[in-house]
Image (cartoon, grey):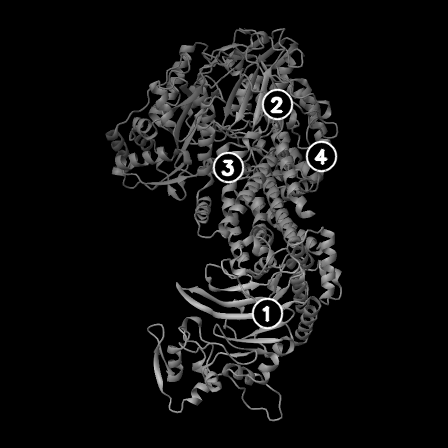
Amino acid sequence: MTETATILETSVLEIQDLSVSFDINGRRVPVVEGVSLVIPRGKTVALVGESGCGKSVTALSVLRLLPEPPACVDSGRILLAASTASSENGTVDLLRLRDAALRHVRGARVAMVFQEPLTALHPVMPAGAQIVEAIQLHENVSQRDAKTKAIALLDDVGIDKPDQCFSAYTHELSGGMRQRVMIAMALAADPEVLIADEPTTALDSVVQAQILDLLAKLQAARGLGVLMITHDLGVVSRVADEVSVMYAGHIVEHATTQELFANPQHPYTVGLMQCVPRITANAPTRLTVIEGSVPRPESKPAGCAFHPRCLLARQRASEPEMDTIALEPPATTSVPRRCAQAASTITSSGTPELREISTGHFVACWETADAHH
Amino acid sequence: MTRMLVRRLLAGLLTIACIYAITFTMVVSIPGNPFQQGQHRLSSDVESALLARYHMDNNWLYFWEFLRGAVRLDFGPTFTYADWTCNQIIAASLPISMSIGLAAMLIALMVGVPIGVTSAVRRHSWLDISATTLILTGISLPTFVTGSALLIAVGVKLQLAPVGGWGTLSHLPLPAITLSLPFMAYIVRLTRAGMIDALSADFVRTAIAKGASRQRVIWRHALPVALLPVLSFLGPATAQAVTGSFVVEKVFGIPGMGQHFVNAALNRDPGLLLGAVLVFSTLLVAFNIVVDLLYAALDPRISEAL
Amino acid sequence: MVRTLSPLITLLIIGGICWVSLGGQESPADLTYANPQGIHTLDPARMSWTSDFRVALNLWEGLTTWNPEDLTPTPGVANLPPAVSQDGLTYTFTLRPDARWSNGDPVTSADFVRGWRRGMEPGTGMDYTFFLTDHIVGAASYASWRREAVSRLVPMSRLAREWEIDTNQRRLLEDTFGTEERDWPRTHQDALQRHASLIDERFNRVGIAAPNAHTLVVRLVAPCPYLLDLLAMPIFLPIHESIERLRSRTNDLPITEQGLVTYDPQWTKPDYHAHGYGGLVTNGAYRLAGWHFKRRLRLTANPYFHSAASVQCQTVDMVVHENVSASIMAYERGAIDFLPSMSVPYDHEIAKLAQTGARPDFVLTNVLATYFLNFNCVSETVGGVPNPFLDRRVRKAFALAIDKAQIVQRVLGRGDRTAGSFVPPGVIPGYEPPPGLGHDANAARALLAEAGYPNGEGLPMIDLLYTPNDSRIVQALAHMWGVTLGATFNLRGKESRTLADDKINRRFMIARGNWYADYNDPTTFLNCLLTGNGNNDSGYANDAYDTILAAANAPRDTAKRAALLRRAETIIVEDDLPILPILFYREPIALSPRVHGLFPNARMWFPFRYVTVTP
């Protein structure tokens, strides 16, 4: 490394200005642009957004699990804090590690839990064998010791009969048990960071709650830093300490969970909150939606990516002064002038930057930025 | 598991019985006299006496007599080679065909699977393209072409192997290689397709996330799953290879079982023909059952479904 | 555990099977030759293939044998010449005292009687029974008496088992025993016993006698000028007495329940030891050392052979190569020393190499065999279509219309000779066949018009039966006939067994045929066209012809006899044309220059006792 990477002392993993693009039909399309995240030690950071916003891509980039030919990391750094236990000095940039070194990180220092455990676990290997493999890849222990540890792990994750589960095959287990096995497997080599990619999406709500509680318990017990990817605000409220909201490849808001729920600033976040159905006495006849849909990465609007759906933008423009902005030819779109103006003068990419509007609360929006100036 | 085994065995027996009945009907319907050997015509009373002696004067009688003998593994006399019994002939030729067939399948697997894996892992590389060309050639070229070419190239020009016949270990490689090529081609194709599917599956991603090396992921995670379709191909393929490829035996002059099918039919030799057909169908059924069992043993998802 | 062990187990199983199939290894033999087919049988009474004769006549020796160079009969076990009675009907043979079996036992005349008897029995004798029944006094009546008894005993044995019998069998029993079923011999056993008690006594009436161990007396029905040649054939070979241990018995009676005399077919194996049998015992220059089915048959020199000291070639291997091209390649590599058959699709190239002398080890041999076409001379219609070949003018026209030289040289090009006669010329000493008809298109057309089909009008579509090997010849012939005579054809190519079936049932107008001589006399060919002969596919029936052939048996003077036979043959090949001879076979053999003592000859007779092989 030529530069010295800086990382907060309290954080265990930092994603700095990550940009990932995909090669779609010969064109390079940016999918994640300038995303930064900090995972403090012992805390859970949630990354929220709709499907297609790039949150899974962000998560997969940490361990470089994206298939390289279509995907390409354009820029950024992913820094892992110096390990207290190992002999490595200093932080490492995961994006620049060689394969052999990366393999030492995967599983042993940063582990991942995936969304659909039925397909994510090996269909023909017994559950126990998969956990034992996770152990033996990083520790030099005998088969018997690994088996003992695996059974202990299965017990830790709340499985009733760990011996039976050890020899069971993936398809013989229930959804909840599979996810527990996946978590056990992830924790087998005592990692410091756990990335959970929508771990409860495939489960029913009762089991969901159990798994989330389990994760919280394990985090507390082992001091893990957890990056929780989810689209469900309910999950966020239950487990996350900090939240980043992601839209169309950008982080649009970041705050502590309490602050975000109490005081959402970005129009998108506001919209998300409103979308959550609430049981009230006077239930509205229709659910609130955010009009429009998430733009495809190839056809992102210029300027603020959210503005075509932004209620604020439409409200503030009394006489909408629309400018026509040329997108990638031959497409064009009409935008309120203020958003377009801002686009040309502030940053070269045209998207609003994250500004700290209050302690620890960042928003990327022209409207709110203006309001607070 | 035992339930499945019993069911399969019963189904297999039924299959063999049907095959016997159909073959028998065909055998007794074709014109021609099994006793006529050379250019001289046999007198009719000698012929009828011989037919009576071998219970062949009445078709129903022969049907049951032969079946009774077959169950005791005695296929009776053969008329083309009068000094031998069908049992002796089958006992002499079956091990030969089996050794060539098994050796061929072994070669096909040991060469075909790595090629399939490598070509799936390095898709569109020159290795993959040459492997695909090999597949196409292996399936398209008939065995008498490849066999004769090998015989001439290796046996005659290079003098590295004997020119046909059987008796020493050096007689084994050429026919085994020739026989293995079409099977190898299919195995490469199946392995390649299975590997491509397996490598794009989620569990491969999980394995990488665990820190497994690329090699480990390919050979210990993806390959076992990719090989399952190969396994189900192996069953009937091995049976086919083992009961003698007539063409390979003809080209290399090997006294295996394949020729008996054809020659017995041409010579109107009912005992040998029925014996050969019964042996073949039993082997085929047996191999299929074995493969089913193996499949169930290796893929736990299947035994659930049974 | 299963996972790691199973490859090992698989390898072990494969290895085991390979080991079993390979069997023992043997050192190379002095002489190795290849045969395109396996040996069908080594039972001398049953065999009919030349390749089987070749092995049998090296294992056994008959009363006579043949000179390897000129095929004249020479002494075998018997001293020559035998004592012949004035009328030429009784031959007395004296056996040489030093003739021995391969286990040391002396060869006696009883052994010959045993062998000849097997040749006549309906259970053991097959194609060549007629050698015995045609010539030896009482043989024909004995054989037919036996056959009749068997044809009665067959349905009786079935009734005894309460199986069905068909109407013909029922009628036979009624004819013999009367219509009351319960009058039929009470038990099948009774009938068997009664018959068995009569067999030996009946056989004693046959004209074969062994007054003492060294003398054999044979009484003939009619003088047979070629008897000594005939006696070398396998059906006249002696059989060792140990075979009696393997005789099929029914409750102590030495016959099967159908009344047949049969033996365990395993008696020809060198290592078969059931019932105290000691393995095959033979009296020729060689004994059978080993026989792997369709792989290899090994002969080793018989130490008890009377001329064992002169036998230089100690071991002979016969290997089976069904792929003749591969056997030629093996010959080129030196793995095989001698190829008696080189029948491959590129035989014209081999013929050229042989004829130009470019390959002196390839020898084109005149074989005593003819390829010809049969005309259906009997059926009025074939498949509903009227058969034009009932008229001999049509047959003669067809014979004149073809140019055989074209076929032999251009179409086949493998060195055969064109055939005008049925009997090949220049092979049988003392006999010159007639020249036959040549190629005369005009005469052909005239004859055809005379028969009522001018320019081929009115000729039905002609049904021509052939095997796939003949397709080139047949197409050329059909073309020639079409051009010259205006004939049209339905060419039916059939596999040989199906074709044989069609021939027997006369479902043809023209059918291919060939004939390999059984012995060195014109009658082997000419007898085929006798009325009612089993091999008379054309159905030709001509009393005059039959009479001449019968008359040819009488004269002891070879010239007179030859003239009579020639006259008979002229009727066939120039007047009536029931068959149309096309060509005489010439077959190439490959003989390594290291091999001395094997001489190409028309009978493909190759005694190995005279062979020396230089390394």
Q: Which residue is mark 4?
A: C188
Q: Chain of mark 4?
A: C
C505 left or right of C57 in image: left
The residue at which mark 3 appears reads as: B248
The mark lying in front, picked from 1 and 2, is 1
What residue sits right under mark 2 in the picture?
C290
Residue toward you, C397 or B287: B287
Residue type, label 4: His
Q: Which residue is mark 1?
A: A39
Q: Nearer the viewer, mark 4 or mark 3?
A: 3
Instruction: Kindly indicate whether the residues beneath marks 1 and 2 are on one polypeptide chain.
Output: no
**Considering only vertical position in the picture, is B150 above or below B294?**
above
Q: Secondary structure at mark 4?
A: helix
Disc 1 from disc 3: Cα separation: 68 Å
Mark 4 vs mark 3: same chain? Answer: no
For the point 53% across and 46% down, the residue is B114
Q: Quadrant of residue C132?
A: top right
On screen, residue C482 versus residue C29, left or right, reads left
